[in-house]
Image: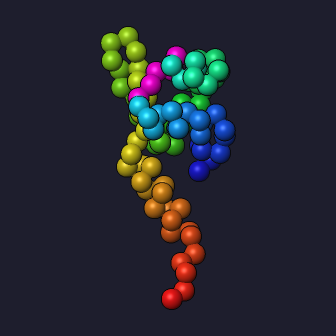
Amino acid sequence: MRALAAAPRLRIVTHLAAQSRTTQELATLLGLSPSVISRHLHQLTQAGLTTSRREGYYVLYSLHPTRLDQLAAALTALTPRPEA
């Protein structure tokens, strides 16, 4: 949850939900420097929320769907159930 607590990281996750992107693409979309984006991506990767893969010269970042499903399930479990 801490990894998602910063607004720039939430914006990164939003963009990665649409498609895999490079640090440079995210920097342009968010109006931040590539080094700032890289630092945020590192935190998301450390939390297990993103993965990366090299395609030629570029490193593409993607969301880790299994980890996001686990997070969603944990949050849903915290939601009070209506009494029947």
Q: How many numbered markers are drawn?
A: 0
For the record, the magenta segment spans: 20-24
Decide which of 46, 1 is in the foreground and name it. 1
Decide which of 42, 61 is in the foreground and name it. 61
Percent coordinates x, y for residue 38 in the rendering = 56, 24
Q: Is residue 17 left or right of residue 78?
A: left
Percent coordinates x, y for residue 5 in the rendering = 65, 45
Q: Is residue 20 visible in this depiction of the protein?
A: yes
Percent coordinates x, y for residue 22 in the rendering = 46, 21
Q: How would you classify the magenta stretch by its main secondary structure?
A: loop
Q: Residue at x 40, y 42 (%)?
A: 64
Q: Is residue 62 left or right of residue 78?
A: left
Percent coordinates x, y for residue 82 in the rendering = 55, 81
- Dividing the picture into quadrants, the one containing residue 55 is top left
Q: With respect to residue 18, does 72 lie above or below?
A: below
Q: With respect to residue 56, does 29 lie above or below?
A: below
Q: Is residue 42 visible in this depiction of the protein?
A: no
Q: Residue furthest bottom?
A: 84
Q: Residue at x 41, y 31 (%)?
A: 19
- Dividing the picture into quadrants, the one containing residue 3 is top right
Is residue 22 rendered magenta in the image? yes
Q: Residue at x 42, y 49 (%)?
A: 67
Is residue 41 rendered magenta in the image? no
Q: Residue at x 48, y 57 (%)?
A: 72
Q: With respect to residue 65, does 56 lie above or below?
A: above
